[in-house]
Image (cartoon, helix red, strand yellow):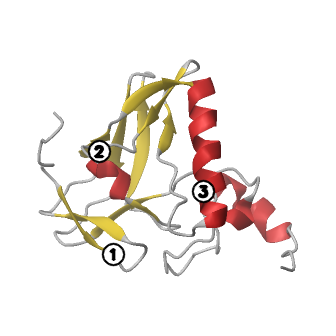
Amino acid sequence: MENQKPEYIEIRKSGIHNNGAFATKDIQKGTEVIEYVGEKISKKESEKRADEVLEKSKKDKDHGAVYIFELNKKFDIDGNVPWNHAKNINHSCNPNCEAENEDGKRIWIVALRDIKKGEEITYNYGYDIDNYEDHPCKCGSENCVGYIVDKDEWSKLKKLPAKKG
C-alpha cells in the first residue's frame, strides 16, 4: 500500500496552494476517489502533534499543514506520511468531493459530482469557526468566504467582525 500509485489522481502544482491532486481520468459522482491514509494515533497524540505544527507555523510560514483526520472517539489518522497522496488535496468553498468516514475505520474522499480529467480534486476541510482567521482560504471559487470553515459555519462567519492586525 505504501507505494501504491493512486488510480484517479496525480499530484502536481496547484493554483490554490502548493501541490494539489488532479483527476487523471473522468470520475463519476459517488466514486471513492482515494482513501485518506496515515498513522493511526490516539487523541492525546493527535493534539500534541497538531499543537507542534501550529507552533512551528508561527515561526516559519512554510510549516503549518496539519494532516490529522478524526477517525473515531479513540483514534485519529495522521496523514503526514509519504504514501498518503490524499494529503495533497486542497480545500475549496465549492468542492467537487467530500470526506466520508466509513464506520470509524477508514476515510474516503468521494466525488460529489462528475469530475472531468485534469480538474483539481477538492473538498471542504470542515474546520470549525474557532481561530478561523488562522486559516485564510485561497480557493478562488465564486462563493469563497475567505476562510477555511465548514459550510455549516458560514452564516456565523458572516456575522463576525474582522479583527484588525
Neighbourhood count class around disc 2 (C-alpha, 10 Å): few under 14, some 14–19, many 20 upward:
many
Residue 47 is at least partly visible in this image: yes
Q: Residue at the location (50% across, 56% down)?
A: 65
Neighbourhood count class around disc 1 (C-alpha, 10 Å): few under 14, some 14–19, many 20 upward:
some
Q: CA distance from mark 1 to mark 2?
A: 17 Å
**For residue 22, which quarter of the picture?**
bottom left
**For residue 36, which quarter of the picture?**
top left
Q: Residue at the location (48% across, 28% down)?
A: 71
| Residue 86 percent across, percent down from the top left | 32, 50
Which mark, by number, is residue 91?
A: none
| Residue 85 percent across, percent down from the top left | 27, 50
Q: What residue type is disc 1 on?
A: Ser
Secondary structure, mark 3, is: helix
Q: Residue at the location (57% across, 33% down)?
A: 46
Q: Residue at the location (47% across, 47% down)?
A: 67
Neighbourhood count class around disc 3 (C-alpha, 10 Å): few under 14, some 14–19, many 20 upward:
few
Q: For the C terminus, which image quadrant?
A: bottom right
| Residue 50 percent across, percent down from the top left | 59, 43
Q: CA distance from mark 3 to mark 1?
A: 23 Å
Question: Which callout, 1 or 2, points at the residue further toward the start of the chain?
Answer: 1
- The answer to whether marks 3 and 1 mark residues whose Cβ atoms lie closer than 8 Å is no
Secondary structure, mark 2, is: loop
Q: What residue type is disc 3 on?
A: Lys
The residue at which mark 3 appears reads as 56
For the image, the number of numbered tags is: 3
The residue at which mark 1 appears reads as 14
For this orientation, the residue located farthest to the front is 59
Viewed as shown, does residue 129 lie left or right of 56?
A: right
Q: What residue type is disc 2 on?
A: Asn
The residue at which mark 2 appears reads as 84
